[in-house]
Image (cartoon, rainbow, N blue to C red):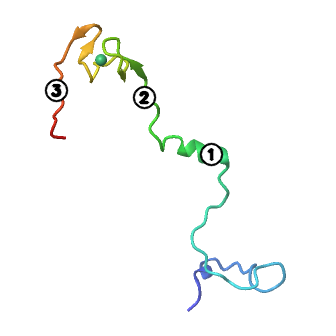
Amino acid sequence: MRSAGDRFPDDRWSGGTGGPAEEIEMGALPKQKISRRRRGNRRRLHFIPDLNLVPCRSCGEKKLSHHVCPTCGVYRGRQVIQIQARRKAE
Ligand SMILES: [Zn+2]
């Protein structure tokens, strides 16, 4: 049985000089090297971007801007949600 290369009858690689000495079965390979720029551009979303954290005006804890503070429950100087005391069991 002949190899998959037979699908392409062009036998410029067989025999003669300059071509590969023997046929080697290769797996799928990328055609070109990915430049550092393209590689980094692709990987730029592999990590969670920095959150826009600002100090809470009420308790000073870091919180998301334009969001209710998860530590004290205050938003724009108003108590919006009641924060339950931390469970001591954990
Ligand atoms: Zn707070």
| Left or right position of 77 against 2 | left
User: Measuring 58% from the left and 42% from the top, which residue is drawn there?
Assistant: 41
Badge 2 local density, few (<14 within 10 Å), some, or many (20+)? few
Residue at the spot of label 1: 38
Amino acid bearing label 3? Ala
> From the viewer's perspective, is residue 63 above or below residue 78?
below
Quadrant location of ligand 1? top left
61 or 77: nearer the viewer:
61
The picture places residue 77, in percent across and down from the top left corner, at: 27, 7
Amino acid bearing label 2? Leu
Looking at mark 1, is its residue's CB closer than 8 Å to ligand 1? no
Residue at the spot of label 3: 85
> From the viewer's perspective, is residue 79 above or below residue 38?
above
25 or 52: nearer the viewer:
52
Are the residues tagged 3 and 2 within 8 Å (C-beta)?
no
Give the CA distance from mark 2 to mark 1: 25 Å
Of callouts 3 and 1, which one flags the residue occurring earlier in the amino acid sequence?
1
Residue at the spot of label 2: 51
| Left or right position of 82 against 49 | left
